[in-house]
């Protein structure tokens, strides 16, 4: 049951393109034992000056001791001037693994690392638990790529729409092999239980070039670089569509209806929308490390964002303010009643 819903309509204008933010420096090493000690396995050499706030860690891991867990094989990063103050990350949540695992993860660094030209970040493999003499596993390959974070208005973000209390419409020019980004905040979640929704589409776009005419591709990321959802052709023709929360709103042309097909719940938070033409590499990579190559379409992409999940609105009976009325509201009220007032 929804306690309150509303919609306000607004329009924002056209913005010029900017350079895309992306991964910075990285290193690839091969045949590394999982229990390396200082001075480490590999060194990331900086080519510029920036602050690394994220890292993509990927590779191929083979066990040496059968009893070892994949999640015990960790990768540490440390500034070259402070080797002892390293920070370590597990690249897998897998326990036992039969032979070889392909691993890929994107992490927010607990301590941002300052990078300058030259030797910058030391990469070391370590074991959370030592299961026997010698290495427990072996990194066949290990690649670590540093990243300074999501696109900003200075390095690739087209606009920050801020909180979404309404419908937003936005048009932008896309060149071939180019992606652009918009940022927005969803103050209240979109969910079936609350009767709220968030719909995003590219209806009204005019693109040329490529295998199919007017072919768009969009992907939604959270602020930690996780892909929330992505779509190629769910809209009319070859246009894109995302829909979260409650349904159902009518389809456009031969597109799908807006029925929350990309998730029955989208939690409140900050999101980044990746916008571009169709590319054969349509599966998003992890984090902000994503390719723009292979995209041929160019022209104007028109974005439509519609929601009734902008500003939180609660009725007085929704005691725990989760957007729905249920038995839990009664229990929470009784708990507060018997607790009394100070």
Image (tube, helix red, strand yellow):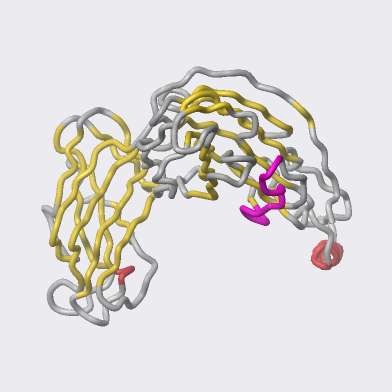
Residue 255 included in the magenta stretch of the image: yes
Side of 99 where 16 appears, left or right: right
Q: Where is residue 332 in the image (x, y as percent from the top left)?
A: 80, 64
As drawn, 8 above or below 280: above
Region of the chain picked out in magenta, as a range? 253-265
Q: Where is residue 194 in the image (x, y as percent from the top left)?
A: 78, 53
- 32 vs 334, nearest the viewer: 32
Side of 71 where 42 appears, left or right: left
Residue 167 is drawn in which quadrant? top right
Going 64% across and 34% down the picture, which residue do you hit?
A: 203
Q: Main secondary structure of the magenta part?
A: loop
Q: Position of residue 283 (x, y in %)?
A: 43, 50
Q: Position of residue 124 (x, y in %)?
A: 19, 55
Q: Residue pushed farthest bottom?
A: 67
Side of 263 where 106 appears, left or right: left
**Quadrant in which the C terminus appears:** bottom right
As drawn, 188 above or below 125: above
As drawn, 40 above or below 239: below
Residue 307 included in the magenta stretch of the image: no
- 93 vs 305, nearest the viewer: 305
Residue 118 is drawn in which quadrant? top left
Going 77% across and 46% down the picture, which residue do you hit?
A: 249
As drawn, 244 above or below 155: below
Going 84% across and 56% down the picture, which residue do you hit?
A: 1
Q: How many labels does the image show?
A: 0
Going 86% across and 63% down the picture, which residue do you hit?
A: 337
């Amino acid at each position: 049951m929804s306690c309150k819903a509303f919609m306000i309509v607004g329009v924002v204008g056209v913005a010029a393109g900017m350079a895309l933010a992306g991964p910075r420096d990285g290193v690839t090493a091969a045949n590394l034992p999982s229990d390396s000690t200082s001075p480490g396995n590999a060194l990331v050499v900086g080519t510029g000056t920036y602050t690394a706030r994220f890292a993509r860690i990927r590779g191929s891991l083979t066990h040496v001791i059968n009893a070892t867990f994949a999640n015990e094989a960790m990768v540490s990063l440390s500034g070259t001037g402070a080797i002892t103050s390293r920070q370590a990350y597990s690249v897998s949540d897998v326990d036992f693994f039969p032979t070889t695992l392909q691993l890929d993860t994107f992490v927010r660094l607990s301590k941002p690392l300052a990078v300058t030209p030259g030797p910058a970040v030391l990469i070391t493999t370590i074991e959370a638990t030592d299961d026997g003499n010698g290495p427990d596993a072996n990194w066949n390959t290990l690649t670590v790529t540093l990243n300074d974070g999501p696109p900003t208005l200075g390095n690739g973000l087209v606009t920050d729409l801020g909180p979404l209390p309404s419908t937003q419409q936005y048009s932008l020019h896309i060149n071939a092999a180019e992606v652009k980004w918009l940022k927005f905040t969803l103050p209240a979640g979109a969910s079936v239980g609350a009767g709220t929704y968030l719909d995003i589409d590219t209806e009204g776009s005019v693109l040329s070039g490529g295998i199919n005419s007017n072919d768009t591709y969009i992907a939604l990321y959270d602020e930690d670089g996780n892909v929330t959802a992505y779509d190629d052709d769910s809209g009319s023709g070859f246009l894109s569509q995302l829909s979260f929360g409650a349904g159902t709103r009518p389809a456009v042309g031969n597109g799908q209806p807006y029925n929350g097909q990309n998730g029955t719940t989208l939690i409140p938070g900050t999101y980044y929308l990746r916008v571009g033409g169709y590319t054969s590499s349509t599966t998003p990579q992890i984090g902000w490390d994503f390719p723009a190559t292979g995209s041929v379409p160019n022209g104007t992409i028109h974005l439509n964002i519609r929601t009734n999940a902008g500003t939180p609105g609660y009725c007085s009976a929704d005691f725990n303010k989760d957007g729905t009325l249920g038995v839990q509201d009664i229990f929470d009220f009784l708990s507060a009643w018997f607790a009394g007032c100070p």
